[in-house]
Structures are given as structure tokens and as C-alpha cells.
Image (spheres, rainbow, N blue to C red):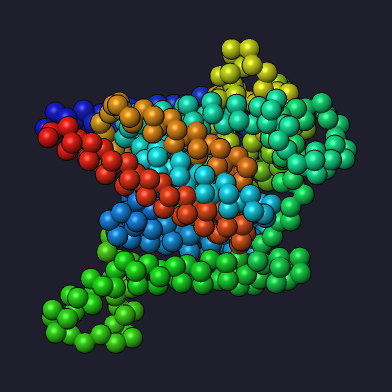
Amino acid sequence: MEDVEKKNRIWAFIILGVLIIISILYYNANVYYLYLVTYIWFGFAYGMMLQYGRFCFASASRDLFVAGVPRMAVGIIIALVFFSIVQAILSAANMSTFHPAPFGIHMLISGTIFGVGMVFAGGCASGSLYKIGEGNGTSILAMIFGLSLGQSIFVDAGGIFKKLLPQSWIDSSVARTWPVGDRITSWYDTYLTGYVWDQPQYTIAGLISKGKPHALDYFIGNSLINVMIPASVIVVVIYCFYSRKGFIKKRMKEKINTGPVDEIAGIWKMITASKKTSLMGVLVGITAGIHILAVKGMQLKFGVDNFGELLMRMGHTGDVSVTGTVFDPGYWYITTQEAQLGAWILEKFGWNMHDNAFFGIVNGLPEPWRNPALWMSLGIIFGAMVTARLNNEYKFKWPKGELYVWGILGGLLMGFGSRPSLGCNIGAFFIRVAGGDPSGWVYGTGMVVGAFIGVKFFNWWSEKKITKAMEALK
């Protein structure tokens, strides 16, 4: 046992040392790569916290709907609250990189698809990354075949899919004045330019101030109204449905009466039931806010709005889109960079991925080693791997039997559920809700519905397998 612990510690320090060396090499190559290094280390921090706190939206849904355990769901709510406060501070100081998303029914539909997928895969987008760091083979399949290759094919498909699009989307897309209209080639291009970009974008601060928010509006609108009040309601609902019965039963056994004040004590007990998860919720929320501040600082330092400008200064013009940009969210985000990785792989096999709007006009297709957001995802994996090694929780497990199917299918559904909404459980829900964007709650509602459907399906599937096995024994 001591040999295993020693080996794990050695591996943890090797991983940390390699990342430090990589960071130094980037800095020596060009000071502009400090921008990219910032993403690496924030990804690393996310990975360590996610693994330590076992933070996963799929686990939160599964624990709640199957076992009635609210620990993870409450931890996510805590993270949201703290992140919203930091976001409000940054917005008030004009140091935020956040921007709201198009609001529409597509958010609910996409969230539902994603919710089913994360249950099938056994992990959400962020959860799959940190589980790769633990050696989970099912998550590797979900990430490579679903979130990477699946997404890139999804946004570049044409043919019969284009014929199924509403004429109004086609007309709206054609009506746009594009300097590169020849890149509107796939069904997704038309959906993006003919529907999504026509939808309104809101933040609560913007709504209550009629588009001219002052510092106080960010705290009242984005943090209090859009996060704290709904979060409080959700916590009370979770308590009433999943924790209150046990709390009351225990007090009755101790012959203690329960009044309104005691109910508050019960809610607090639920929140603090797992100190580790609650603590990580606080740290994740604060770290996500500091990440925004750090990226904004890099942009001010180098006088840019997007890492694509720095790539062009360094002569890497083939990495950027025709508009001179690459995917550079400015905050914690997952799935788009995985799609870029999938597209990069497919291009090596002769598939042209530059001829569409998603890569060709909006996000670019940088080499993986010059992709800041992709390095953030890799940082999550390595950060989780270090924590798992230090806690002796790392174990490579290649999937067996039907887990191959669930991993790939779940990854595909997560990819299909993230692209129409322009984000996943992090980018479309966590970041947007905390930033005051009500579309995040629409996506989150879809995720919960999808997770419920996924859990019910697995319950049916498990019962069916047990019944079949019992019949075989007769």
C-alpha cells in the first residue's frame, strides 16, 4: 500500500512539473503565450476542485432522483451564488468578459438533450473531464467520440438536414450581409445565422435598468434576482422533498418539537451535510470569478479582445477565422474547444472544416497546442489527475460491455445538446445564470428534465436486465 501511495505522489509531482515546464517554454517562445498559460492553470485549479469535491451535474441529478441525496445539487447551488457575487463585482468594475446568450425555446430543447446524454455517459461535460483524470475509460469515449468528433461532424453536416430547415431561417440567413457568405454551408450554419443570432439577449441588470445598468443593478438584478432568490427557492424545494422527512423523523425520535426556526436549522444542516462539497462549491464560484478577472487583465495587458489577435501578431494566421478570431470565451467553458479538436483531427483525414460558419467565421481552428480553451480542458484533466493521485483515487478503468455504447451515445447527446445552445452545463447554465442571463435557467430546466428522463430510462433498463437474468436462472 505504501508503494502505491509513493508511486501516486511521484506521478502527481511529475504532472505538476511537466505543466510548469510547458508554461516556461510557452513564455520563452513569446510573452503573448502568457494569455494561454492563464487558461492552463485555471483549468488545473478547476480540475483539482472538481475531483476533490466530486462535482458533477450528472451525479447531482442521479443522486437526487435515484437515492434522494441532495449533497451535490446543493453544492452546485452554493457555487452559483458565490460566482454571481464575484460576477457582479467584476461587472460593476467593468472588468467582466461575460456576455449573455440568445434567449429562446432552443435552450430548453438543447438542455433536455444534454441532460439525457450526461446521465447516459455517467458524467456531464466538466464531470467527464475530471473523471478522465481519474482514469475513467467511459468518460474518455464520451469525450473523444461524442464531444469531439461528434460535435464537429454535427456542425458541418448538410444534405438532407438542410432540407428540413424552416424557410424563415434560410431567408434570414441569406438576408445577412456576409463578406464570406460561401461559408454558410451546413444546416447548423443556417440555424446559427438564420435563427439563433436573431434571438434577443438579456441580463436582468440590463432589463431593470433599460439597457444602461449601474453598479448596483448588477448586484440587485444579476446576483439577487437572477441567482440568490431562485437558488433559495430551489434549496427550500430540495429540502422539502428530499431532506425534511429525515430531519423531522430524527427530531421526533429525540422528542423535540419542530417550528419555523427549526426548519431553517434543517435547511442549514442539509447545506452543511457534506462540508467538502460545500467548501468546493464556494471555491469553484470564487475561482470562476477570478478567472474572468485574470483573462480581462491579459486582454488589457496586450491590448486585445481575443487571443486570435495575438496569434496573428505571432504569424499564425492559419489558426484564426476569416474574421481574425479564435474561440476565446474569457471564462470557464467546455465543449467548443472539444469540437475544435475533433475538427482538427478530421482535417488530418481530408475533411474540410474551414468551410463552415462555426469554425470558418466564428471560432477558428487553431493547432491544439495554440488553443487556449483546449488547454483549459487539458488543465482540468491534469488537475483532477494530480488530486486523484494524491488521494490514491486514480485507477484506469476501460469500459466493459454496454458501457462502450453508453459512453459514446451519451457523449454524442451531450455534443448535440450543447451546440444549439452554444454551451453545456458550464457555458450554457452555470456561467450564464451567475452572469444574470435568464436563458441559463431555461437551459438548466431542460437539463433537469433530461436527467430525470435518463434516470428513469436506466431504472427501466436495469429492471429489464434483472428480470431477464432471473428468468434465465429458472
**Residue in view at x 60 percent, y 30 percent:** 154
| Residue 35, visible in the rendered structure | yes
Q: In which quarter of the image is the N terminus?
A: top left
* Left or right of 76 on screen, residue 95: right
Residue 378 percent across, percent down from the top left: 46, 32
What is the number of callouts on the image?
0
Quarter in which the C terminus is drawn = top left
Residue found at x 76% / y 65% = 211
User: Which is more toward the observer, 26 or 390?
Assistant: 390
Can residue 362 be seen at all in this image of the molecule?
A: no
- The part of the image, by quadrant, that contains residue 94 is bottom right
Quarter assignment of residue 172: top right
Q: Which residue shows up at 61% across the image and 51% down it?
A: 107
- Front in this rendered view, residue 25 or 434: 434
Q: Give percent across and percent down for residue 11.
A: 28, 28
Q: Where, by quadrant of the figure, is residue 440 drawn?
A: bottom right
Q: Which x, y percent locates residue 350? A: 63, 12
The answer to whether 442 is drawn above or below residue 144 in the figure is below
Position of residue 260 relative to residue 301, above or below, is below
Residue appearing at x 18%, y 85% in the figure: 256
- How far from the left and from the top, in percent, is residue 59? 35, 49
